[in-house]
Amino acid sequence: MSILSHFEAKTEDMTYTTKAGVKITRHARALDEARTMDDLLRQLDHQKGAVFSSSYEYPGRYTRWDIGFVNPGIEIRSYPNEFVVSALNQRGRLLLAAIDEQLTKNSQIVVIERSAKSIIGTIESDHELFREEERTRQPSIFTVLRSIQELFASSEDHFLGLYGAFGYDLVFRLEPMPLHQKRDERKPDLVLYIPDEISIVDHQRECAYCLSYDFEIAGQSTAGLPRDGAFYAYRKREDIPEDKKYKKGRYAKLVAQAIRSFKRGDLFEVVPSHTFYEPCSGSPSEIFQSLRTINPSPYGFMINLGTEHLVGCSPEMYVRVDGHRVETCPISGTIRRGKNAIEDADRIRQLLNSEKDEAELTMCTDVDRNDKSRICLPGTVKVIGRRQLETYSHLIHTVDHVVGSLKPERDALDAFITHMWAVTITGAPKRNAIKWIEQHEASPRGWYGGAVGYLTFDGNLNTGLTLRTMKMKAGIAEIRAGATLLIDSVPQDEEEETLTKAAALMQAVEGTKGVSSNPHHKKDAVGRGKRILIVDHEDSFVHTLGNYFKQTGACVVTARTALAKQLLNDSADFDLVVLSPGPGTPNDFALHETIDRCIEKELPIFGVCLGLQGIVEYFGGKLGYAKEPMHGKASTITVTEHGKLFNEITTCFTASRYHSLYAEQVPDCLTVTARSEDGMVMALEHKKLPIVAVQFHPESILTARHNIGQKIIENVMKRIHKK
């Protein structure tokens, strides 16, 4: 569903009154879809606000959209011992007075200081014992948020709400436990804004709108007041202190400690993290734009918190609520992407066949279902997607999709709280995992492992886990990454996974682009200036084969047998003749005549499949029919003589075969250089003449792993010399 699916594209004003009596007027105006967010992002370099961006599509789960704002009227900050609600401009002061009045109605909220610009308060703790089903309703900063939501609650609008970031330490307000790490009590664990002008881009519907809100409370209105805010300078930096540089092996030691806890039975799984630091020479908006290009994700974001920025591209939904439907998409099971689609397919097979990765996700989803069962109607918690694949720039993940229906007496904040924090970022049992993380990680998590997103005043919620995120402050990007550990984890492998997860963010900070996997980009154009004749034996792969030769820089002429013979008779102005694959037998295409003409003209020959068979017959060998024809099947090829054809290629590799005929007897003048696992000849070369051939298909996708097929073609080109 698109983000504007419930929005009527009308530019006239809409006026409605909230359940608490606040009169709100909303004006909508159309915007330029292409420019809207670019302009907003530049403002966010220096002014408070946020952009949330979904640049990833998945049917039934994610669509592409952006929503953002700058200079909000109200800011809410939570600290370990107090909360602060601030008016950030003149418009916010009117709202602040109404919020103050609303908060005083709740006996659990104590306002200890108030002014025209801010409210400072605390939450009265309830020391009585309570049932676990009531944990999400215990007094906390969420009591304040629920009270503010009640003030502005209305089903008339779907965008006005609370937008921002929820820090990891909020979990300790709900699950108190001893804290071992030193914390700066001046750092907030929650920052949310109430914007009164919101820009929305719906890429699915190809439209954009700006929604401007004015409020009328007790006879006073924000109409005509400026939408302004403070300016914050952003400082760039070219280096980082020595003590913040990455030290290899530290995380592996953390994994070893976790394994000891698994053996004692303290934990089933845990997700520890560690931190990387990078100097930032670019602005937050530049880095966010780069990150969004490098790694499209469903939960991209840039938030200006005043003293620091959060920039991220999270792949994982934390909690989403639409009406009574609550859903999550836990991610666990990760593998690095291959260099191309073929290697991706191999990695996917490896990932899906991994019992460890399946166990990881199973535990995550079982805990997630348990979290929902606290606040959902019995029988409504269901897994609607199991081990589904999501592919990102550097990684492939397995994902489950879990839904439930909220009990009538529960709301979106209950759904948010019950999942704090997702097992995919903590572990299981969750409370023990959180305690272990607090005892073993090097520093407090801060924003990492929390959530970003928004709670709208119509009661809906859309949040992503704060993963693949950097905190940018004073010119340094702080990037945190972790891995899901089980008892059979390999410490070095898990550390490597964290590096892979951080790679896209580091790449964005460094301002580099990914190295293209396009094979046109070659270090040495080994075929430049060389002319090649491909004799087409009416094959369906000949143009792909020709493409491989063209990628070396060579000039390629493709001709069927009759024209090829004419070209060879009229001119020998070729540096190589390629005998293509084809159906039938070599005699069907009179290959002996073609080979005879090439030898007479002293032209090098490279044969593929039928071409190899023709060479074997020409020199007196014998062909036979395979008991099991190999048509589009992969085989392991073992190199028996490396020579120049297999230079810098591994002894064993996978290649594709399309043949029924095979070389049953090879004449003495030919040397076999490779065989398949069933013993058939897969490559050979002439002992004296410049003639080489392969039975497999180098141009097939099944030979593309590690770029083997292209490397073989390059080696062929290196053997020949321009006339």
Image (cartoon, grey):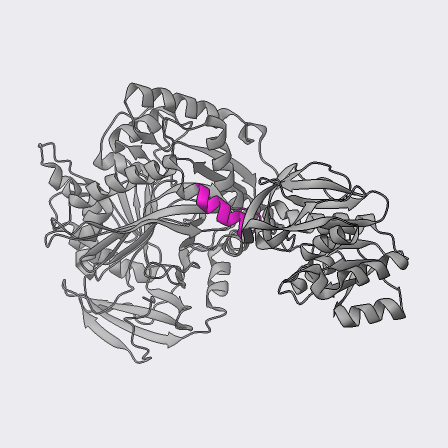
- Comparing 134 with 397, the one in front is 397
Q: Is residue 92 visible?
A: yes
Q: Position of residue 125 (x, y in %)?
A: 15, 36
Residue extent of the magenta highlight: 338-350
Which quadrant, please, contains the N terminus? bottom left
| Residue 293 on image: x %, y % | 53, 56
Which of 478/217 is in front? 478
* 548 horizontally vs 723: left or right: left
From the viewer's perspective, is 420 left or right of 282? Answer: left
Is residue 469 at least partly visible in the picture? no
Image vertical order of residue 575 relative to residue 470, above or below: below
Identify the residue shown where x is 11% and y is 32%: 127
**Residue 688, percent from left and from top:** 86, 44
User: Does the magenta run of residues contain 261?
Assistant: no
Answer with left or right where residue 129 lies relative to residue 626: left
Magenta region, main secondary structure: helix
Query: Does 438 sit above or below residue 663?
Result: above
The reply, left or right, for residue 51 in relation to residue 656 is: left
Say which quadrant the C terminus sits in: bottom right
Asked whether 112 or 664 is in front, the reply is: 664
Count all numbered tags in the image, as a single digit: 0
Residue at 75%, 56% (x, y): give it.
552
Residue at left 89%, top 56%? 602
The foreground one among 346 and 230 is 346
Q: Position of residue 482 (x, y in %)?
A: 42, 35
